[in-house]
Image (cartoon, helix red, strand yellow):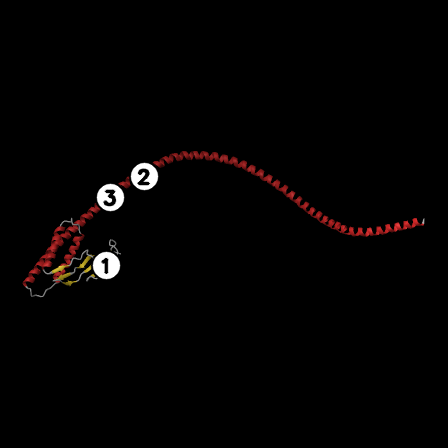
Amino acid sequence: MKRQITFAILLFSSFGAFAQVTQEDLEKEIKPLTQKVNSLQSENSKLKSEIGTLNSKLSNAYQRIDSLRTKTQDNSNAITQTANQLGIQIKETGDKNEGKITEVSESLSKNSLYGIIGVLSAILLSGLLYWLLSKKQKTDKTEVETQLSNAKKSIEEEQVQINTKLAELYNGQMELLKQERKANPSNEIDHSLALKVADEIVKMQMNLVHMDSKVRGHKQLTIAVTNVFDNFKANGYEIVDLLNKPYNDGMNMDASKEPDPSLNEGEQVIRRIIKPEIHYNNKMIQKAQVIVAYGE
């Protein structure tokens, strides 16, 4: 009996000790779980609050969507009504315009026909007037050119006649000068008359070069000028022929220069003679003055 009671006491003591150890362990395990549960409850509360806010926003959004749907429907109805009205107006305007276009087309057809006829008539008339004016202008131009040509020809013929008489006069003077010197060989020689005649006869020579050989009297003047040159030689004078001869800067003469596009670069030609170069008994008594043309 005592053994049984002792065993029972030992058994109960063992259960008590076991029960004490297990409770401490459980408390250690339960404590973190409790903390996690509290944390989850706190987060759950926050989520519930946020869900409430979102529900409120969704409700407002649904209300706005419903309002927009209503406005969209109203706008669609208004657009449909406006389109119907515009369709009717466009049809009425089209009918009116079609009638007006038909009237304008008929009017334009008639006016265009008249206009084309008028334009063609104007062109034909202008062409006829242009032809008549051109013909008259050509006729007038031809008449003017003929008159100018005749006037030039007449002037040249008169100039030739005058120069021929002058050349004959100069020839006579040179003949008298030759006879006078033969009669009085001891007299001092005066070259003034010979120099003056030479200047004039060279001018005649240049005119002959630039004059048409078909001008009446051209041949007679050429003969008269040649006779004067012959009489110059007979009196011991020589007029050096310089006209249209090449020129170089070393020549003993007074030269003025002017450009001539017809000449090559560096080429120089004596084009005009102001005073001729004159020799007496092979001695120069007058230096030439000339105009020289040069190529650029």
Give the labeled residue for mark 1.
257
Q: Nearer the viewer, residue 172 or 29?
A: 29
Q: Nearer the viewer, residue 15 or 250?
A: 15
Image location (x, y in percent) of residue 18: 84, 51
Image-based side of 157 in relation to 118, left or right: left
Image location (x, y in percent) of residue 37: 75, 49
Instruction: Identify the residue at image location x=15%, y=55%.
Output: 205
- Mark 1 Cα-neighbour bin, 10 Å: few <14, some 14–19, many ≥20: some
**Vertical arrangement, residue 179 with respect to residue 102, above or below:** below
Q: Quick one: quadrant of the C terminus?
A: bottom left
Sequence-wise, which precedes: disc 3 or disc 1? 3
Sequence-wise, which precedes: disc 1 or disc 2? 2
Image location (x, y in percent) of residue 106: 41, 33
**Please, what is the three-letter code of the amino acid marked with disc 3?**
Lys
Give the labeled residue for mark 3.
138
Give the labeled residue for mark 2.
123
Instruction: Identify the residue at image location x=21%, y=47%.
Output: 145
